[in-house]
Image (spheres, rainbow, N blue to C red):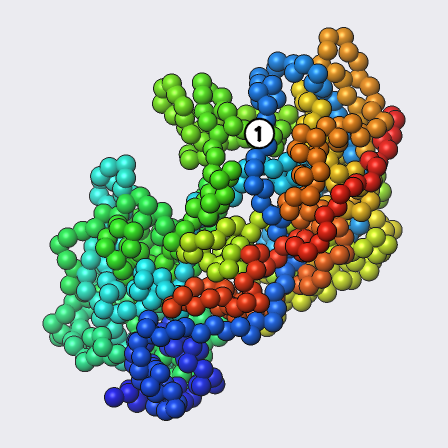
Amino acid sequence: MADRDLVERIRAMRKNTDLNFVVETMLEEGEEEEAIRAAFAVVNPASAARQRAQVNERPAKRDCSADQCKAPFRFVALNDRVEYATPAEGGPRHKPIPDGYCGAIEVTWVAETPLLIGAAEGRNGDVVGPMRLAGEWTVPGSSLRGMLRNAMESVAFARLSRINGHHRYGLRDFEHPEYKGDGFPVSKVDEVGAGWLRKRAGGPSDPDHSGYEIVPCAWAQAMIADLPFLGPAAPWDWVGWKLGDKYASAGMARGKVIDFGITKRFSPGGEHNGKQVLTIDANGPISGALVFSDRVPPGKEPPSEAAWRASGKKVEYVFHSEQAEVVELTAKAWATFRRLNCKPARNKLVADGSWKVLERIVEQGGRVPVFHVGTPNADDFAFGLTRLFKVPHKHSVADIAERIACHRTRPVATDGSADKIDLVENLFGYVLEGDGFTHAGPGAKPAALARKGKLAFSFATFVTPVVPQAEATPTVMMGPRASFAPFYLAGGIKDYSAGDVTLAGRKRYLPRYRPGTTANDAWADIRARLGGQMNSDNRENDRIRTSLRFLVAADGGEMEFRSTIRLHNVTESEIGAVLWVLTHGGDPAAHRHMLGRAKAFGAGQIRVERLALALRPNAPGAKTVTIDDPGPFLAAFETRMGGTAWRRSATIRDFLAACRPGEAADLEYMTGPGPFAKLKKAVKPLTGDTPPCPAYAHPRLLPACPESAAPRTTRPPPPQGRRR
């Protein structure tokens, strides 16, 4: 028989005829799927027979109504081979390469749109402004270096090494096979366990373990409406409270620190959706600790009574009856948990969400509640901080990147140096750690390999008068992260748990403005886009709102600045690689670079105006000469890379297309959660081997160059250098 409360709540929902919406909404709030489907069948009797079928046995249906697929970035196809440095190029830096050079390239740049590379200003640091050096506005050499290296990794066929390969993104999707039972059955209440996470006394038992452990226990539900410490607040107010405020009201805080050692007595209070309910009773037979979830949804006002009754968020939890057996977490299980509960970073993880509050408790010797599924420390094991917690996808970014053979190869350490270093790593330098390289002996594997590059980038100085804008522009700098599989993966089914996907490529922001667009017109457009990021939900949210103060020309026009790139012990083709990236193969007038903040909105569009190349051959007694024609160097690089076949490759076609200003359409972000959810559903795995929607089954949804575009087989003559 259907639960009357569920039936009434479904009837009150705005989209009560949409089964997927009803199931997903109520699962998220702790209801059981079979109960939801039974109640839905009462509200919609025509579909009763279909709803009685087990969800894993019925073919899933896709939402193919997504009508948007756009973003301000595109992806450059990954190279299918790697161009390695020659033994001479990779040799000792102090040993001159025969036929090599030292020298410098003086670059004159022009910024066509406002530019911002800087740091926080003011007492609160809530405004980001441009950078000054010795009182003069400047562009850091490190920024120019990063911009050119990113470009050269595509152009010179580098290994895909500078990625968060270790990251395994999280999954909380009630339709996903991995979440429903094939991998981590979080949505099945009978398969979810509970326990207390704490540091292990004495640290890890061996190098494979983390030094953290879980003490298993039983868990039950506590009805929010029955909590005696609500006071004058209503249950629908409670779900909007911050985590710390909830525990403080329950008397489970010492100052501002939550203390899960503070327990209460409980008595059995029946069941709710097949799970035991406990009620607070000073004389009750059960001792346990209350466990609360953070406010729902975070950062918004508490829901109305009607919204609360429709939402299904009726319960919190009680942890009780600890078990004697303790589960010591492996280093792998602990690392996975931390990455799912921290902001993405490579060398330092920053706690996020509820973990931001609870991490301190664990590190100070306390304990915090967790839910878990699977066999402890096995591949199907996962744990989290809420009843419906995120679980890891099957594959990490590195797992997927290594499906392309050439990106699987690692440098090999031999006698303190490294073989199999690609051309770009050799030019720009490298630091290799952990699994970033292999070891060929003799002796133990070194902790790291590092080598200085052959290129040095100066700070840039402005030639034209520039000023910072008088007023900073408030905005919210948010866009799809790499976890958004439809954009970042290639394949029919685009999902980090799929077995046949690859990475979509290297991301590049596209220049928006065609030659001839005035700086003032561009700024009006950029300002409107930045302002468009603000809405009623985020306008007052200090955590995500920022203000940007751009550098602009004093006369409202373009900004000219100059920098120097110094070259040490480089070959003709290495010089050609640098020149090719700077000039986009000798055609700088038709292409643009993108630099600094707010590239997604059009800021930082720059071009190379002039080059001055001066070289000194490595031969004894040779003198520095000015090179008027860089053509031979460009030709040497192109010949090395494969000539016409390289030029026609998808990688180079994509790269050049991504650098041509104003040629791509639909450069706006999709807005609101709807389009993202629809697009994700169109291409994610569903039960029953449901194929992806045909309109979105292309290998890459955001290629920089449409597959039908004809390759460029010729290039314009190189720009003429200038004599000093």
| Residue 350 or residue 62, whichever sits in front | 62
In x, y percent, where is residue 93?
A: 60, 18
Q: Mark 1 = which residue?
A: 84
Disc 1 crowd rating (10 Å Cα; few below 14, some 14-19, many 20+) is many
Q: Is residue 686 in view? A: yes
Residue 513: image quadrant is bottom right
Residue lying furthest left in this view?
Answer: 285
Left or right of residue 296, residue 111 in this image = right
Q: Residue at x 26, y 79 (%)?
A: 273
Q: Name the side, left or right, on which 182 lies relative to 634.
A: left
Q: Is residue 580 above or below residue 693?
A: above
Is label 1 in a helix, a strand or a loop? loop
Please give the name of the residue rendered at 78% of the width and 62% of the height, measured from the top-left corner.
524
Q: Quadrant of residue 713?
A: top right
Q: Is residue 209 above or below residue 190?
A: above
> How many marks overall?
1
Where is residue 630? Give x, y as percent: 80, 29
Coordinates of residue 209 in the picture (x, y in percent): 27, 42
Q: Is residue 27 left or right of residue 600?
A: left
Q: Determine the residue positioned at 38% across, 87% down.
A: 47
Q: Is residue 575 visible?
A: no
Amino acid type, mark 1: Tyr
Q: Residue at x 78, y 44 (%)?
A: 607
Residue at far top of view: 621
User: Quadrant where the C terminus lies?
Assistant: top right
Image quarter hosting the N terminus:
bottom left
Q: 91 and 645: which one is in front?
A: 645
- Given residues 535 and 490, the one toward you in this image is 490
- Residue 519's spot in the image, x, y percent? 82, 55
Considering only vertical position in the picture, is 333 above or below 645?
below
